[in-house]
Image (cartoon, rainbow, N blue to C red):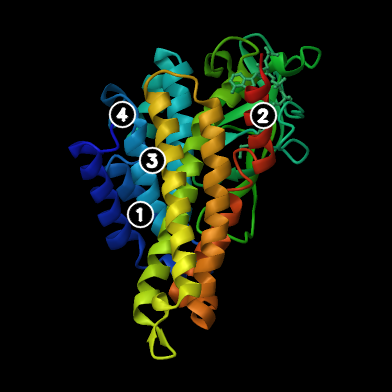
Amino acid sequence: MKFELTEEHLMIQKAARDFAQNELLPGVIERDNEQRFPAEQIKQMGELGFLGMMVDPKYGGSGLDTISYVLAMEEISKVDASASVVMSVNNSLVCWGLEKFGTEEQKEKYLKPLASGQIIGAFCLSEPEAGSDATSQKTTAIDKGDHYLLNGTKNWITNGSTASVYLVMAQTDVEAGHKGINCLIVEKDQEGFVVGKKEDKLGIRGSDTHSLMFQDVKVPKENRIGEEGFGFKFAMKVLSGGRVGIASQALGIASGAYELALKYSKERKTFGKEIGKHQAIAFKLADMATEIDAARLLCIKAAWMKDNGQNFDRAGAQAKLFASSVAMKTTVEAVQIHGGYGFVKEYHVERLMRDAKITQIYEGTSEIQKIVISRDILRD
Ligand code: COS
């Protein structure tokens, strides 16, 4: 067992760190205030290969492993979790799903522009009445011979208005339950597709989260991913990888807040010495550093298992469950260490605290991760 990163890993980590510091940090507070999508920065991320990191270069990707993806997600998330959620959805939910389960035609037509960052994608599973209980899909895709007729509403969709391609789960055969769900590739300009209201959120305010409406949208049969009825399994498999991405996002939010708290602890003086020299603060830093290291190991282990063809469902769920809890605890403590300064926007930690909360909710709540983990533990 080796605990060392390769030269290539270190290079990618540095490239992501430099990009985050130079391109994302300036303006991150304003984008959060104004709920402004980081359009220019996402374009640059596409050009640098961060939007299709694990995709084979023959489909426009960077051909890297999942460990590289974890490292890059951590660095980007330290600074701007609104940018990293775009990266996570495009890489793990959209590109990975298309590369693993799409047809050659789907890869040529959709994966190439998505992986090279010319366009971005969205993953549409959640509905007003189907979040954790994801099999309760009300959106329907009625089989009309050469096409499906898509009707329904999707909620909380990341990249809702900025995506060009949407992977939409919908029920074709109600009797068949989850085995009657399909995943369809929908293009934004298709007739009957309406982008609904933008959500006004607690955190990740720069990312655009929308509801979407489908009214008699005709989706050609060749846009179905996998066999008839494969949609729910597709969503579950893709979300397993997505959870590694969100775990890495949570890790980055935590380590970003920790680095700021550490720096502040060495600068700020009270009672005649730097606050880091008071045990009350030193012990907080010790807890933060230890938990962040543990979260990073869980993320890298899940990534390694994925890269080595092992079942990583439980490892991904454990990484997300733990890292998201570390993100919450660390960011709250980082605000506390900053005292009054932590409560104002200029010092960044209050934003990281608000951004942390969603990592315990999206792509499966912490409670859902406990279902996945406990079922695996208790399986015969
Ligand atoms: N990979 C492949 N197949 C999977 C799977 C996985 N990781 N997880 C579940 N499945 C399959 C099961 O094997 C089952 O298929 P069979 O009936 O053929 O055996 C099917 O999916 C249904 O699974 P299950 O019976 O376990 O469904 P439940 O309704 O009990 O739900 C959970 C399982 C709770 C794990 C699932 O609904 C879930 O992950 N919910 C959260 C969804 C989510 O993350 N929402 C956020 C939206 S994206 S922001």
Q: Which comes before the other along the chain, label 4 or label 1? A: 4
Q: Position of residue 65 (x, y in %)?
A: 32, 30
**Outermost residue toward the front?**
279
Q: Nearer the viewer, mark 4 or mark 1?
A: 4
CB atoms at circles 2 and 1 under 8 Å apart?
A: no
Residue at point 58%, 51% (across, down): 325
State the SS at label 2: helix
Mark number, residue 331: none
Looking at the rendered structure, the number of numbered marks drawn on it comes to 4
User: What residue is disc 1 on?
Assistant: 41
Left or right: 24 with respect to 358? Answer: left
Distance in Å between CA atoms under marks 3 and 1: 19 Å
Give the quarter of the image for residue 46.
Answer: top left
Q: Amino acid at mark 1?
A: Gln
Please tell me which residue lies in front, 302 or 211: 302
The residue at which mark 3 appears reads as: 70
Q: Nearer the viewer, mark 3 or mark 4?
A: 4
Q: Residue furthest bottom?
A: 272
- C-alpha gap between disc 4 and disc 2: 27 Å
Spatial CA distance of label 3 from label 4 is: 19 Å
**Amino acid found under the numbered disc labelled 2:** Ser
* Residue with the mark numbered 4: 1
Q: Does any portion of residue 165 appear in the rendered image?
A: no
Q: Where is 279 relative to 156, above or below?
A: below
Q: Secondary structure at mark 1?
A: helix
Residue 79: in sight, yes or no?
Answer: yes
Disc 3 on helix, strand or loop? helix
Amino acid type indicated by mark 3: Val
Between the C-alphas of marks 4 and 1, the distance is 37 Å
